[in-house]
Amino acid sequence: MEPGKNKIEEQDFVKCAERLIRREHLERGDWRILLEGRTQSRQQWLAGQASALRDRIYGKRIFIRGLIEFTNYCRNDCFYCGIRRSNSQTSRYRLGKEEILSCCEAGYRLGFRTFVLQGGEDPYYTDDRLKEIVRSIRQQYPDCAITLSVGEKDRESYAAYRKAGADRYLLRHETANAAHYAMLHPKEQKLADRIQCLYTLKELGYQTGAGFMVGSPGQTTETLIDDLQFLEELQPEMVGIGPFLPHHGTPFREEKQGSGELTLYLLSLVRLLLPRVLLPATTALGTIDEKGREKGILAGANVVMPNLSPADVRGKYLLYDHKICTGKEAAEGLEALRNSMNALGYEIAADRGDIAPEC
């Protein structure tokens, strides 16, 4: 989906864009015009609109989340993921409760007030183990937000984590098109199950995060429209969007990586669609482009997630090849990150960074 590939008249594009800016519901044809009518100048204009909207709601503040990748074991076999269970080349690891708490302690000293516990769907971490970890973090850091990203669970499990002290939950839907979902996952994994989990999380009071890959094999304009319409329906508090990047240990090893420019454009569209959303400039975006994180902020993102994981395991949580985990991507590089945000006219916010209330 290259910019300007399909000739969309300027007046048609502007009409659809202005409807989006006014928060009007867009039909599929409207989204098609916005997606297929992308040009460099139109992308820059929409990025400016998205950034201005974000600034009106959140000011010049960028929120940081301390990412703790605590296990790279996973029971699933997603075709795009480097920690899929069939990848026998992966060096597996798990962090114990004390190691996780040590990451939190280091992050707290650095100024982090949100911890994101991310891992594969690892059966070792039973509900009791996860509850104990969450409860311990909540007791030691009562002023911090706790985010979990551990995949699909039943309602009782989600409720138990919530009761233990978890505030937020990230569960990217990857694609809202069932046929496309089937191209990316083994047959035992169903889009309907993923969608049900997201609605359950919302019902339980989590700040809920969805999201999708850009440029995954089989993705089309129509599947992207499905994603955008699903986000409008779900109204998540967070949306994670990053380019698809292949991993050598997966069936998609030879597939073309996703477009950084299209990812940035979609960040702007999502900001305009969901003005209050917490929107990360992802590690994948920074991997594909050394200035990707900064470009993501300029496109409307307002969250960055430096890595708090122990240095000796960061290279093992490899969802895709060449993942960056040092420099501004690492907690130790927080000063460099702060400087890069300052250079853009933004500041790192030293608080939990909750979603803005409805105006």
Image (spheres, rainbow, N blue to C red):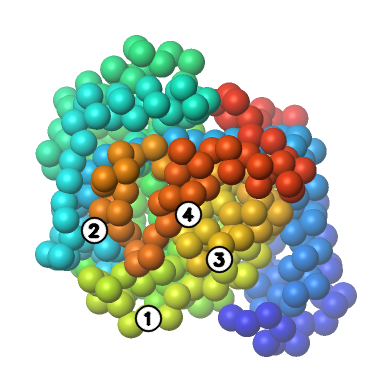
Q: Which amino acid does label 2 sit on?
A: Ile
Query: Counting residues from the N terminus, which is met first, the one under dot 3 or under dot 4?
Result: 4
Assess disc 1: are there few (<14), some (14-19) or many (≥20) residues with their C-alpha within 10 Å of its C-alpha.
Answer: some
Residue at image position (59%, 54%) is 293
Label drawn at residue 255: 1
Percent of width and height locating residue 277: 61, 42
Q: Which element carries disc 3, helix, strand or loop?
A: loop
At x 52%, y 25%, the residue is 111
| Disc 4: which residue | 283
Q: Distance between the residues labelled 3 and 4?
A: 10 Å
Q: What is the C-alpha distance between the residues marked 4 and 2?
A: 16 Å
Picture residue at 22% right of the left edge, 67% below the top: 186
Visible in this render: residue 206? no
Q: How far apart are marks 2 and 1 (CA)?
A: 17 Å
Indicate whether 213 appears above or below 194. Answer: below
Q: Where is residue 54 in the image (x, y as percent from the top left)?
A: 73, 43
Tell us which disc is closer to us: 2 or 3. 3
| Dot in front, 3 or 1 | 3
- Disc ID at residue 83: 2
Q: Is mark 2 on a helix, strand or loop?
A: loop
Q: Residues within 10 Å of mark 4 (few under 14, many from 20)?
A: many
Three-letter code, disc 3: Asp
Q: Nearer the viewer, residue 355 or 260?
A: 260
Q: Is mark 1 on a helix, strand or loop?
A: loop
Callouts 2 and 3 close, C-beta under 8 Å: no
Give coordinates of residue 30: x percent, y percent.
70, 69
Q: Tell me the tag on residue 289.
A: 3
